[in-house]
């Protein structure tokens, strides 16, 4: 296979890998009724005038399946952390005892579980769309290689390889979604 086509395949695969990583991160944010530090990813706390990730202003622990404990590095950060969690609207009210912040994750109702599964399916679909868009871009780049005297047969082989890679990444997205759905539906 032509080196130019190989480069396009490698680039497409690297970009699809990033899409999978992003999809995994989005699925992690969907809480499955179990406490996890990942639920707080993306929450920014005002730290001396700068928005700072929550994980950088305190230690986050999960002492049991229903509780997240945040121990700020500095005591004066309790109120800003509490405010940031409230503003993030993650569906959990922080409990501030003056030295730590405790988040108690409520058990999920059957209705809420079904809503979360729907959300998992939406995120998985977004991941698949991203992968298909990467496939489209890769195929367009491969077609443009005709100008660089790449034969039609090599272009067809390159496009077939892009499809194989795409199919394998779509399967990965489906597997991640399936695992998350099981996690949510397990009582």
Image: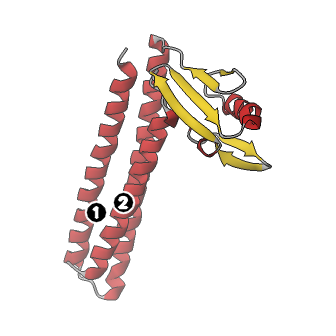
- Residue 91 visible in this rendered orientation of the protein: no
Q: Which image quarter is the N terminus in?
A: bottom left
Residue found 48% across the figure and 24% down from its top: 63
Residue nearer the viewer, 127 or 18: 18
The residue identified by callout 2 is 135
Q: Position of residue 131 (x, y in %)?
A: 39, 53
- Residue 79 visible in this rendered orientation of the protein: yes
Q: Where is residue 71 in the image (x, y as percent from the top left)?
A: 62, 33
Q: Pointer 1 and pointer 2: residues touching (CB < 8 Å)?
A: yes
Secondary structure under tag 1 reads helix
Q: Which image quarter is the C terminus in?
A: top left
Q: Along the horizontal axis of the image, is 125 left or right of 51?
A: left
Residue nearer the viewer, 160 or 6: 6
The crowding category of the residue bearing disc 1, from other C-alpha atoms within 10 Å (few below 14, some 14 to 19, many at least 20), is many
Q: Residue furthest bottom?
A: 149
Residue nearer the viewer, 141 or 45: 45
Task: Work out whether mark 1 precedes mark 2 in sequence or the reverse, and give the earlier one.
Answer: 2
Coloring applied to the structure:
secondary structure
Secondary structure under tag 2 reads helix
The residue identified by callout 1 is 162
Q: Along the horizontal axis of the image, is 81 left or right of 33?
A: right
Q: Where is residue 56 in the image (x, y as percent from the top left)?
A: 61, 46
The crowding category of the residue bearing disc 2, from other C-alpha atoms within 10 Å (few below 14, some 14 to 19, many at least 20), is many
Could you tell me how many numbered marks the image carries?
Answer: 2
Quadrant hosting residue 150: bottom left
């Amino acid at each position: 296979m032509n080196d130019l086509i190989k480069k396009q395949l490698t680039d497409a695969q690297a970009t699809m890998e990033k899409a999978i990583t992003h999809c995994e991160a989005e699925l992690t944010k969907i809480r499955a009724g179990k406490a996890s530090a990942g639920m707080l990813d993306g929450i920014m706390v005002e730290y001396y005038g700068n928005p700072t990730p929550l994980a950088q202003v305190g230690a986050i622990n999960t002492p049991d399946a229903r509780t997240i404990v945040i121990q700020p590095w500095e005591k004066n950060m309790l109120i800003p952390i509490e405010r940031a969690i409230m503003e993030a609207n993650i569906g959990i009210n922080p409990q501030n005892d003056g030295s730590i912040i405790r988040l108690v994750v409520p058990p999920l109702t059957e209705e809420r579980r079904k809503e979360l599964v729907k959300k998992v399916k939406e995120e998985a679909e977004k991941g698949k769309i991203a992968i298909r868009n990467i496939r489209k871009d890769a195929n367009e780049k491969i077609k443009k290689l005709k100008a660089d005297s790449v034969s039609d047969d090599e272009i067809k082989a390159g496009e077939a390889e892009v499809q194989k890679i795409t199919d394998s990444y779509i399967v990965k997205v489906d597997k991640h979604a399936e695992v998350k759905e099981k996690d949510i539906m397990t009582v």
